[in-house]
Image (spheres, rainbow, N blue to C red):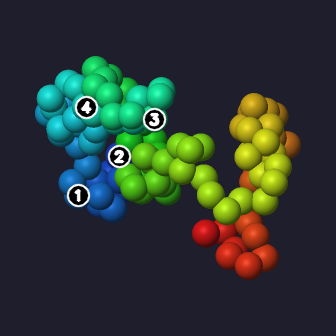
Amino acid sequence: MLRLGGAEERLLRQYPDLPMDLKQCPTCSGKEHFRWKGPDGQPADFECDCIGQVMMNRWFLHCGIDLSYQRLGWDDLTGTDEGAQEECLAYAANVVENVAAGQGMIPWRADTGPG
Ligand SMILES: [Zn+2]
């Protein structure tokens, strides 16, 4: 059984289907391989790091990011203001310093809000 410290009880209450072993890997369902978009944009087969996927799933859920949003990458980003991706990357590159300084980041637009 996998554990995520003291936050686990809260996660289990909020997500009763939280994977509790590697056979419930959210990416491959225990098959140890999965099909996803390859570097050339075409479907490709990958070995699954099930431990990493289960732990990352828990960490994202702990941070309030549901599974559907965990699957998004920069290629899925559309309709953003020019420079938004660079600002996000710059914030993420210095996240430790930004958090220590009490600075968070909320992507937001006047017409769509945070969505
Ligand atoms: Zn897996």
Q: Disc 2 marks which residue?
A: 8
- 48 above or below 41? above
- Position of 63 compared to 109: left or right? left
Q: Disc 4 marks which residue?
A: 34
Indicate the position of residue 31 as horizontal and vertical percent values: 15, 29
Between the C-alphas of marks 4 and 2, the distance is 27 Å
Amino acid type of disc 3? Gly
Pointer 4 residue Cβ closer than 8 Å to ligand 1: yes
Per the image, label 3 sits on a secondary structure element best described as loop
Answer yes or no: do the residues labelled 4 and 2 have beta carbons within 8 Å?
A: no
Callout in the foreground (2, 1): 1
Indicate the position of residue 36 as horizontal and vertical percent values: 34, 35
Q: Disc 1 marks which residue?
A: 16
Callout in the foreground (1, 4): 4
Chain-order first, disc 2 or disc 3: 2
Report the quarter where the N terminus lies: top left
Q: Disc 3 marks which residue?
A: 41
Per the image, label 4 sits on a secondary structure element best described as strand
Counting every numbered tag in the picture gives 4
Callout in the foreground (3, 4): 3
Amino acid type of disc 2? Glu
Residue 13 seen anywhere in this rendered image of the structure: yes
The residue depicted at 75 percent of the width and 31 percent of the height is 93
Amino acid type of disc 1? Pro
Indicate the position of residue 106 as horizontal and vertical percent values: 72, 59
